Image (tube, rainbow, N blue to C red):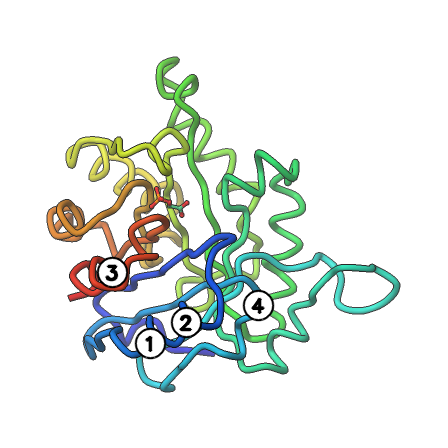
Amino acid sequence: MINLTNFSSIFIANWKLNGNLEFIKQYYQKLLNNPQNCTIICSPSIFLNKLKTNDKNLYSGAQDISIYNEGAYTGELSAKMLANNQISFCLVGHSERRQYFNEKSDVIKLKSINLIENNIIPVICIGETLEEKEKNITKDILKYQIENSVPDISNFKNTIIAYEPIWAIGSGLTPTLEDIDEVHTFIKEINKKFNQYKVLYGGSVKASNSRDINMIKNVDGCLVGGASLKVEEFNSIIS
Ligand code: PGA
């Protein structure tokens, strides 16, 4: 398993359902390497073997995984198969999976267990909707999601948490820096064991705001969607 404590910050590009072979070729010709940070590119699974990694600080990651390890489950991809292909990370419980594919926290927990057992680091995503934020129940929602999605076998060495307010994803809106600080501090204090976890922020991260967001003490990096598709912009985020 990758040693997360080696890195001061972790940046993840979440390409979602985007990319093709030519895009990948051009992307890696231009992608910069910042040795202090860990950079993880999460492409659609079919392209994972086309991505470049370097065993030091550039890795690839999947965007989802099956709850099953093998068997008659047509269309699925297992953690065991990712491990077999030297994939080191996998997003789990992204809000688009929760929203469009009805994924619940118990499934996210099972997926995370499968990944950890195969030496792959799950990046467990949590976040509140706008409605929940307006009702002032963000912290209750996050606590529930953490307690029900993060398995007992997780620890700061084998699991990453990503806080992504759903209303900020792809919308151009972001919480204030004070709000991000408050929520990340809250997450790390839900339980003593979360204190040392890497907690990333995601939701409309771009070159123009990433620096300020990353300066927040309890922010350990960013999960970047739309802006990660423009390699020049992603370069300026990771540097
Ligand atoms: P965004 O997406 O950066 O486009 O808001 C983030 C994500 O969905 O992980």
For label 1, the residue is 28
For label 3, the residue is 234
Q: Residue at x 46, y 67 (%)?
A: 158
- Of the two numbered discs 1 and 4 on the same chain, state the one appearing first in sequence: 1
25 and 122: which is toward the camera: 25
Q: Does the CB distance between marks 1 and 3 fall below 8 Å?
A: no
Q: CA distance from mark 1 to mark 2?
A: 6 Å
- Of the two numbered discs 3 and 4 on the same chain, state the one appearing first in sequence: 4
118 and 192: which is toward the camera: 118
What amino acid is found at the position of numbered circle 3 in the picture?
A: Phe
Rendered image quadrant of residue 156: bottom left
In what element is the residue under mark 1?
helix
- Of the two numbered discs 2 and 4 on the same chain, state the one appearing first in sequence: 2
Q: Residue at x 15, y 48 (%)?
A: 216
Question: Tag count in the figure?
Answer: 4
For label 4, the residue is 116
In what element is the residue under mark 2?
helix
Q: Residue furthest right?
A: 72
For label 2, the residue is 24
The image quadrant where one finds the C terminus is bottom left
- Of the two numbered discs 1 and 3 on the same chain, state the one appearing first in sequence: 1
- Of the two numbered discs 3 and 2 on the same chain, state the one appearing first in sequence: 2
Q: Is residue 221 above or below residue 100?
A: below
Which quadrant contains ligand 1? top left
What amino acid is found at the position of numbered circle 1 in the picture?
A: Tyr
| Mark 3 crowdedness (10 Å alpha carbons): few <14, some 14-19, many ≥20 | many
